[in-house]
Amino acid sequence: MENHLSIFNWATNYLNLQGYSVLYSPETVVETPWSSVFRFSTSKGNVYLKQTAPSLFLEPKIMQLLTELHCGVPIVITINDELHCFLMKEAGESLREYLKADFQPNLLHQAIKQFTAIQRSTENQIEVFFALGVPDWRLDKLATLYENIINQTEFLKADGITDKELKILHDLSPKVLEQCELLSQYQIPETLVQPDFNTNNILFNQNTKDMTLIDLGEIAITHPFFSLHNFLLQATIHHSVKEQDKLYYQLQASCLENWLELKTKDHLLEAFGLIKKLWPIYSALAYYRLMTSVDLPALNAYYAHRPNRFAGYFRQYAASCGF
């Protein structure tokens, strides 16, 4: 990300005008090809400055909307549309880091229940999110989105997809459509989905025990279980939860709890199974969005430890279908 001096000057001037005294130079919290976050220590506590890639600069408006809906997200102080950045209040520490020091399964359950409550509460607000520019990835569009991506031949080949693999992906188009149609038969309302819902994108306040959802610039409207599958997957990676453990099944039950008024647990588990099958397709869509929003060489360098990540999602799906 660029323009650090410009955004630092803007943030400092704004804070001074609002009666804040900036105590130290801003600290870098995180810097990636798609966003940067900086911490300002002030006389009124810590304030965070975030700048995103221009095409991902939906986040502050999404956060303001979710605040109006009484969802647990950071409070936006002010927005600079020209510099694609905004200031927000502090909300706690990374839940992932807290759990690494003191693992408490009940906090995983709390995070799931809070997020699914947000999903349920926004089911009837999807048109408002569309108006903000949030992508429409509902199941009746997913197969077409898949088709659009696999027709980006040169883009796919640049990431390592071979002609043989490309043919397989085209041959799998009817399978993608079939699975989307089957999943839609469960009639689970589509809603807000965060592609990377995990404990590192949740802040935890040790004093109040409140949780705050962050990193909302890449949300889409699609099937809610995509976010929940990712949460469970990340729990196996970062919190040593094993897929056959009792805790895994308990967490999965928490994922489904807010939909039990609509469907039986068995039906919800069947739908969750279909989500697992379609997960690589959803992941490819989310990563394609990122790839086309930032400087691609910078993104590839950032993920140098995971080369051909985009192609990997398609290979994962093809392998799950027997290819």
Image: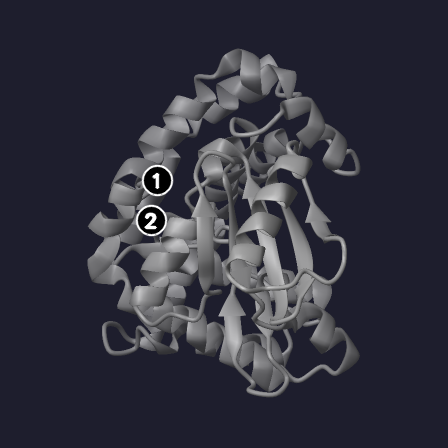
Q: Quadrant of residue 198?
A: bottom right
- Mark 1 to mark 2: distance in Å? 6 Å
Do the residues under discs 1 and 2 have CB atoms within 8 angstroms?
yes
Residue underneath mark 1: 135
Residue 200 placed where, x, y %? 64, 62
Q: Quadrant of residue 72?
A: bottom left
Q: Amino acid at mark 1?
A: Pro
Q: Is residue 141 left or right of residue 315?
A: left
**Toward the viewer: 300 or 140?**
300
Q: Is residue 16 visible?
A: yes
Residue 250 placed where, x, y %? 53, 81
The residue that appears at 67% across and 31% down in the rendered structure is 299
Q: Residues within 10 Å of mark 1 (few under 14, many from 20)?
A: some
Instruction: Look at the numbered disc 2 and give the secondary structure of its residue.
Output: strand
Looking at the rendered image, the quarter that the C terminus falls into is top right
How was this image coloured? one colour
**Toward the viewer: 236 or 124?**
124
The residue that appears at 37% across and 50% down in the rendered structure is 61
**Toward the viewer: 217 or 182?**
217
Instruction: Look at the numbered disc 1 and give the secondary structure of its residue.
Output: loop
Sequence-earlier tag: 1 or 2: 1
Q: Is residue 164 visible?
A: no
Q: Amino acid at mark 2?
A: Ile
Q: Is residue 315 left or right of residue 30?
A: left
Residue underneath mark 2: 221
The residue that appears at 45% across and 66% down in the rendered structure is 73
Q: Image height check: is 193 above or below 266?
A: above
Residue 319 placed where, x, y %? 58, 38
